[in-house]
Amino acid sequence: MNQKTQISMRGRDSDHPGFTLVELLVVIGIIAVLIGLLFPVISKAREASHRSACLSNLRQLGQAFIMYANLSHDHVPLGHIADEYQWDYTVNYATSSAAFVTHIGVLRDAHLLDAPQAFFCPSETDPQWQFATDANPWPFVTVPSAAAHHTRIGYGTRPGWSWTQSGKWPDPMPKLVKLKSKAITADLLIGPTYVKARHKTGVNVGYGDGSAHWVNLSDFENPDWDTIKYDDFGPEHDDSLLNQKVTPPTGVWAALDRN
């Protein structure tokens, strides 16, 4: 290669230098903007998928209730624990003094729904209502101990029938034939915080006929229920969830019913 050719090539290289720092920052900025634009779209698509899976879970639960009713003279394990309508999601009760299957947990014991993930909403982020966490053991705790935890499912069931903290079942048990158009399962309705932390704008609801549907928050919230704060439990909130002392019944669960 002669000297003239070398000079020509060096000149051509100098005409095309690498990216400057400013150019790199511009490219990084553009990528950041694109990510910012795509992230809400991805999040929305993920939530749509979770909501669909949640709806499928409630349909599976509905079929399990129907099968249980066929085996038990139409009785089904709905209700709440003690005197708190908000406590409507426990499948296994476990403390330092007692450990036993209760409430909707009898569906699992009857092997009517052997896929445990169907008991849990995929949009839930609180370990207390997620599948197989330290705070929510699966398989169930069967031996009382100081470290024992209850097992909760990710859904609530229609309150109104009391399961005791000593293991006693409601008497009489609810009958499914009377609940065909009634909401019997739903995303957690403990208070507004629980709804808004999951699907944000509403809940999936399962009905006594085995169907399941989406219901907007504006269609069922009420002023008393809307004031319940996170971790605020007690029988004083019962009427905001379901008040059967009036005709027609009022409360969140009554608003979810198909009349």
Image (cartoon, rainbow, N blue to C red):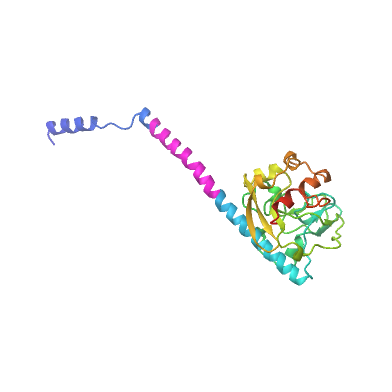
Q: Is residue 89 left or right of residue 53?
A: right
Nearer to me, 162 or 36? 162
Q: Is residue 233 left or right of residue 113?
A: right
Q: Main secondary structure of the magenta part?
A: helix
Which residue occupies 81% across, 55% down?
A: 160
Left or right side of 2 for 146:
right
Indicate yes or no whether the magenta region holds residue 242.
Answer: no
Query: Can residue 113 be seen from the camera position used here?
Result: no
Number of callouts in the render?
0
Quarter of the image that includes the N terminus: top left
Name the residue furthest top. Answer: 22
In this picture, is 170 found above or below 32? below
Residue 150 percent across, percent down from the top left:
77, 53
Query: Which quadrant would residue 93 be assigned to in this image?
Result: bottom right
Can residue 173 be seen here?
yes
Residue 173, position in %: x, y? Answer: 82, 63
Q: Position of residue 196 (x, y in %)?
A: 65, 43
**Which quadrant holds residue 60?**
bottom right
Q: Kindly give the residue lying farthest to the front in the view shown.
A: 247
Between 17 and 109, the one nearer to me in the picture = 109
Q: Can residue 27 be found in the magenta stretch?
A: yes
Which residue occupies the foreground of this view, 149 or 207? 207
Q: Residue at x 66, y 47 (%)?
A: 219
Question: Who is closer to the viewer here, 107 or 151?
Answer: 107
Which contiguous range is marked in magenta?
A: 25-46
Instruction: State which quarter of the image contains the C terminus.
Output: bottom right
| Image location of residue 224, percent across then percent down | 76, 41
Q: Residue at x 65, y 61 (%)?
A: 211
